[in-house]
Image (tube, rainbow, N blue to C red):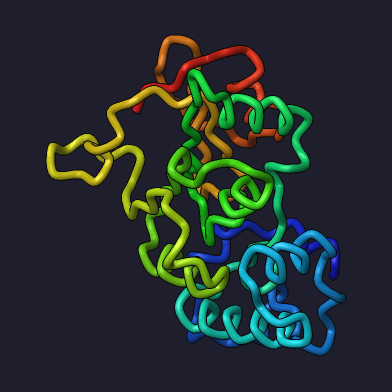
Amino acid sequence: MSGNASNLTDAGARSDLGDNTKDVAWYIADEDLPELDSQAYEILVNYSHIPPDSVRAHVLKKREEAWKIFPFPCIGQMRFLDFSLAKMPSYDKILARLNDSLTPARLLDVGCCFGQDLRRLVADGTPSENLVGLDVEPQFLSLSYDLFADREFFKGQMIAGNIFDESPSSPMASLKKHYRHCPCRFILSPLRLGRSGQSRHPPSMSDEECSGFFDTGTSIRI
C-alpha cells in the first residue's frame, strides 16, 4: 500500500466518490490483499462460525457489496476488520468494566462502521447487551450482521443516527445515558468531549485521547 493511500480518510474520499470505480488510490485489488489478520480469521471462524475454507471468499464478497454503496478507504483497504479498540492500552480495563457483575458499564462505539470492535468485545466475553453501535450510514449496520453472521444472537443496539442530532425525533433520544468509553477510530469528523460535556472538533485524535475517556473516568452523557 502506498503512503498516500494509507493516509487517505473516508471524509476525503466522500468528496470524490465518483461512480464507485476501483481505479482509486484507496482500493486494493483482491489479488493484492494480504492474508487476513489472524484475529479477524479467528473471530470469523469461532464467533461467526464461517467455515475456515470460506472465510476469505466471504469477506471479499461482503467488501464488494459494501464498495458498491460506500467506496471509502476503510472498505477499499479492508480496515473494517481492524480491531483497533483491542490494540488500545486500556482494553483490559474496558473489558473488566463491561463484565463487572455488580455494576457493568455500557460502551458506545461512535462511527462503528461494521461494528467490528463490538464483535471483538463479545468474542472476548462481553455480553452484547452492554454494547451500542452508532453510525450515520444505516447500510453499514445491516452489512455488519451479514459480515459477522450474527443477526440471530448479537443483542447489542445498532443505531443509525448522527450524534449531533438533538431533535426529539432523533434515534439519539434513546441514548440518554452515561457511557464510559467512546471509540472514535472510524468517525468521519471526530468529536472530542471534555469533562464539562462540551464537544469540539479537533484536527485529529489519537488512540490515547480516545482511551483517555475511560482511563480518566470521564463520563460521556449523550
**Residue 148 found in image quarter:** bottom right
- The residue positioned 50% from the left and 66% from the top of the image is 150
- The residue positioned 70% from the left and 87% from the top of the image is 57
Q: Is residue 110 above or below residue 50?
A: above
219 vs 49, nearest the viewer: 49
99 vs 77, nearest the viewer: 99
Q: Is residue 156 above or below residue 6?
A: above
**Where, quadrant-wise, is the C terminus in this rendering?**
top left
Q: Is residue 2 left or right of residue 113?
A: right
- The residue positioned 45% from the left and 48% from the top of the image is 133
Q: Is residue 140 left or right of residue 48?
A: left
**Where, quadrant-wise, is the N terminus in this rendering?**
bottom right
76 vs 63, nearest the viewer: 63
Q: Is residue 206 left or right of residue 71?
A: right
The image position of residue 171, as x and y in percent, is 24, 46
- The residue positioned 46% from the left and 38% from the top of the image is 130
The image position of residue 27, as x and y in percent, is 69, 77
Q: Is residue 212 above or below residue 15?
A: above
The image position of residue 116, as x and y in percent, is 60, 56
**Residue 137 found in image quarter:** bottom left
